[in-house]
Amino acid sequence: MDANVIKELQNGLNAAYINGSVAVNLAYKPAFVSNNPEEGKKVISSVEDELLRCDQFQISVAFITMGGVTPLLQTLKELEEKGVKGQILTTNYLNFSEPRALEKLNGLKNITLKMYDVEAAGNGFHTKGYIFKKEEIYRIIIGSSNMTSAALTINKEWNTKLISTENGEVAEEIVEEFHNLWNSEYAFPYDDFYEVYRERYNIIKHQREIAKSEEIPSLEKYRLKPNSMQERFIANLRKILEQGEERALLISATGTGKTFASAFAMRELSFKRVLFLVHRVTLAKQAKKSFEKVFGKKVTMGVVGAGFYEYEKEYVFATVETLNRDTHLFQYQPDAFDCIILDEAHHSSNNIYTKVINYFKPKLFLGMTATPDKRDDNQQGKNIYEIFHYQIAYEIRLQQAMEEDLLCPFHYFGISEIVSLDDKMLQATKLTDAAFNQLTSDERVRHIIEQSEYYGYSGNRVKGLIFCSRVKECEELSKKFNELGYRTVALSGNDNEDKRQEAFERLAMDEEDATEDCQPLDYIFSRDILNEGVDIVEVNQVIMLRPTQSPIVFIQQLGRGLRKAPGKEYVVVLDFIGNYNNNFMIPVALSGDRSYNADVIRKYVISGNSTIPGASTVHFDEISKDKIFKSIDKIKGMKALIKESYISLKNRLGRIPFLYDFYENQEIDPLVIIREYKTYYAFMQVMEKDKYTNNLSEQEKLTLEYLSKTVLSGVRPDELAILSQLLHKDYIGITEFKTEYQKTFGFEISVAQVKEAIQVLQGHFVSKEAEYKKFCQIDILENDRPGMIRRVQSYADRLKHIQFYKQVEDIIKVGLTRYQEKYLPWKNIDSPFVLYEKYSRRDVSLLMNCGKDLSSVMYGMKRIDDDVFIFITYHKEESQDEKNYVAGKPDYADAFEDNLIFKWDSQIGKGLESSYMQDVLGATRKHLLVKKSDAETNFYYMGEFDVMEAKNAQKEDNRGRMQPITKVTMRMHHAVREDLLRYLQSNITA
């Protein structure tokens, strides 16, 4: 065995069991494996990582369910394609393992499945072990996790990962024990056990269902109680009413129980007469059923609309179309109701709603919606927040709803679309025949069916929704599915309420309820009529066959499957991803991160499965990842996204937002706004033309541009702390400032650092003389008296201009908050850099107190005093001609071998004895910064490294001449984080 591998193993054992502060290669370090999504940890992620790097695997678990197998299906398919063989041993203990899960695993050509018969053996079987072998190394996860959804994602599970050579005693014993069980006379091959086990499982399952139905529930258990969201909503609503407000808005993700929340609120607040307003009679009937479950017979309830006219009931569920007509509206006095509830309240700005709202005078108008932000919110009278007086009773978005287990978990799979059309072609008013034939081809139909059958569903049969890009596509695909034996319908806006309702009922029904006249449906195809207001809780598969139009629409369609229902453990979401510009919106929607920071979006594609809350999982196949990354690298329409975010935030706040409002409300990243507009004031001039016309002087604009460019990012607090004090003081004593600084940030600042910050605030932090001539006019402060920082009088005068003052204050607030949340908690007192944060070359110049911006000369390698910085683009741009590499961008062999070792090639022409290499080797501190591709502007700070080896070599230049280079082996001081390494190494380039 390789001596280096033995050494790595010894180092890993030392770090795991003796000295945890030692930096070691994580691939050889034993670890504790548990579920903690907030820290990016899930057992399933550890299992998948090992599956993807092993040559063979063996798994022994007591229980296997579809909920445990489904999220692993994409990984298992990849292993099947690679020919990586696996053995899986489970048991008939308690008849718990699901036959469908066993059948699914057995269907994979590379997997052999056996079942250990505990009854015949006469002993229990509780093993939970995952054994992975790569070459001569075993990695074994052993502990408490069965192959079930809860065990792999949310349960409190304790597992340990052992790492050993194949000759290690513990690994030998575990593998031998597996072989003994596998070869035991009680371990039966699939064909020998499956039929009998499935029969027994179904009998016992049926018996359990009968027993469950015959149980007499206690009164306490039977009584409906509000969930956590509903309790908080009711408490907040009570406060709003106590403050004398008459309107309130509940913003709640689809499936979290808005209707029940309103029912509980009506009960707790003792409203006697209530009007529940909807836009379809189906929804009125559904809402009435929910209210009846809460109230029983305590209040009378009726429907108004579609032939029902039960005006006199205490609780009336009416369609707005009916009540909008005078004949029906004037059945009531304006004060007839104590409370009026508007379901899908984002429609309440429509004229048909406005008439009803203006007529009635209840004690409370309660709006409920999952999607309050609409594209026309900036138009007069269209702002939903304004309509409800900015009184948000409660807001719970998708991520929080998943954390609180209010929704059915989902397993999302991003799958490569075989259609070559882009979104421009799909959005065309009229498709060409060739394009339509692609969308409805037999090949595409086969592809969709193969994927839907492979990834499956939870429950006894599929009950799916399929979203397409146009109505004709829905109709043709439905027809082709039906020809292949599926039972489907296509619904559009042309279908009446009765036809829709019949389709919903057929989708929801079970096989045993079928009649000659009414057969179940497997799928409903639709374009967008199912986006909202449809409550089919039984939906267990959602298929998306269209480009993502926006995160809102994506969540609306995903949300159709997120309602909990008996017998539904999870919903499978299949998203067929083509060459679409808006692909970047998929991770935005799934993560709930609205900052549109490209780095955050990229990382979610790679690591979202570890961080998504609850039992849900997220997977993208390699081609889909590639398509999403290309979309992220070329995000189009960023200014439009910023404007949309601004309008939404302004409507929510009821005032013009500042940059800090974007940061606090987790909207567009303030740095993204500044990158597009240079200053927030310039953006305001675009958005609020009348109010922001020539309000600032040229000097004030220059000051804002310089501060936005230099200190807004908050990579260090020095300048921001000075600016903060100078907002209100003419002078600051440096000694006094240092004391205040230490109190605020918890570490000292030297006099030299204060002087550097003063230089920066005097406009010196520029790259060219011409730039200094521009920014030296900002005139903020002077340091003309010993030990004092003085505010320049003209700056003090400018601060009296309220518009300028607010803009400066806003920059300071954003910068300091970013620093305190993003950098300070992880700051190392010996370094200005935080491990794995992103920095620009300009940031490096600032943090190293270079006195000016050295970005233009900071390429490849830069020596600054006793520090040297190596800048790496991990995936180099490929040459499109016959040259070896793109001019100025040689294809250096730069790569991480593992979590600790990085191989680096020096610049061409720089041998070991060159001054260039002496700058590298002679530096006291050596820093590595890496970005994935040229599509990224900033670099991840990977930490300090030591040079293990440096040797002369040669490389051919673009003229075909061999030139000297130096090949360097670096060892990082800290093992690189797994998710970041996976991101950098993934084969995705711009």
Image: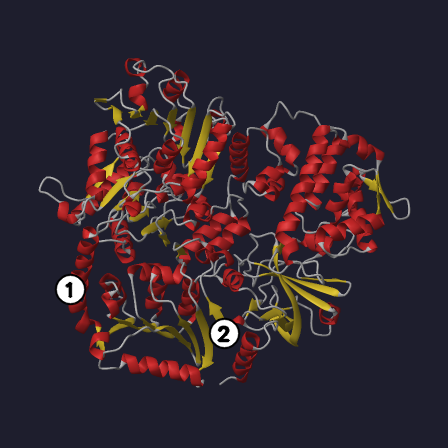
Q: Position of residue 750 (x, y in %)?
A: 81, 56
> How many discs appear?
2
Which amino acid type is marked by label 1? Glu
Which amino acid type is marked by label 2? Pro
Q: Position of residue 326 (x, y in %)?
A: 31, 13
Q: Give the residue displayed 36% in from the left and 51% down from the top.
A: 409
Whether residue 135 is situated above or below residue 762 in the rendered picture: below
Mark on residue 925? none
Secondary element type, mark 2: loop
Whether residue 304 is situated above or below residue 859 in the rendered picture: above
Query: Could one spot residue 766 in this view of the protein?
Result: no
Determine whether, in the image, residue 229 is placed left or right of residue 676: left
**Mark 2 or mark 1, earlier in chain:** 2
**Which residue was labeled with disc 2?**
30
**Which residue was labeled with disc 1?**
199
Q: Position of residue 806 (x, y in %)?
A: 69, 33
**Quarter residue 121 falls in:** bottom left
